[in-house]
Amino acid sequence: MYHALEIAKYVIDKCFKEGAPVTNLRLQKLLYFIQLESYKKNSIFMFDDDLYAWQFGPVVPEVYYEYNMYGGSPILLHYDTLNIKLNDRILINQVIREKNNTPIWQLVKNTHKEGGPWFITVNEFGLRTAIGKKLIMKEAERV
């Protein structure tokens, strides 16, 4: 299992190299879908950090604050990400391929869907609270 920041650096590097750099908001959505897909495919989480229910969907605060100086601009950075295992890179790349061209507000809407982890967390505990890993596990089983 990785730290979310390691996965974020891989995503940033991959998207930058492909000429489609991500914003912090898109990065947060991709991290959520990577976590979901990892549990769905492998029954383990890709990273150990908690996701929190923020206004525009799930967020890993440490990652958000690392890149918040970019605001809504693309993150134009290059990282050495050789520490990510091949099978994990394949899964991450798949999520990037599937989600990186989706309009950002559609991704936000997808993370806010009724009955989903973000929705349940916000309605039961309020914004800026941790999304329980069990909710993500249930969501992975549903999709």
Image: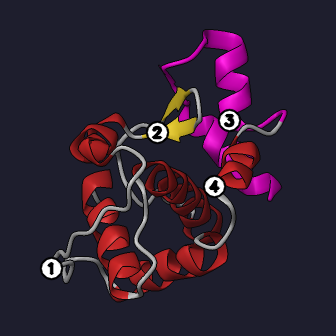
Q: Is residue 1 above or below residue 119?
A: below
Q: Which residue is mark 2?
A: 59
Judging depth in this view, the residue of 57 and 20 nearest the camera is 20
Residue under the image location 62 percent in, 71 percent down = 41
Judging depth in this view, the residue of 31 and 143 nearest the camera is 31
Q: Mark 1 or mark 2: which comes first in sequence? A: 2
Q: Which residue is mark 4?
A: 104
Foreground mark, 4 or 3?
4
Region rendered in magenta: 114-143
Give the class, few, some or many, for how many residues have Cα within 10 Å of label 1's Cα (few <14, many ≥20). Answer: few
Secondary structure found at label 3: helix
Instruction: Find residue 117 and name its label.
Output: 3
Residue under the image location 64 percent in, 47 percent down = 137
User: Quadrant location of residue 1?
Assistant: bottom left
Foreground mark, 3 or 1?
1
Q: Mark 3 or mark 1: which comes first in sequence? A: 1
Foreground mark, 4 or 2?
4
Instruction: Find residue 80 and name its label.
Output: 1
Q: Is the Cβ of the residue at disc 4 closer than 8 Å to that at disc 1?
A: no
Gap in Å between the C-alphas at discs 4 and 2?
Answer: 14 Å
Task: Find residue 75 and report its horizontal and vertical position in percent.
Answer: 31, 62
Q: Mark 2 or mark 3: which comes first in sequence? A: 2
Residue under the image location 34 percent in, 35 percent down = 61
Note whether residue 129 is visible.
yes
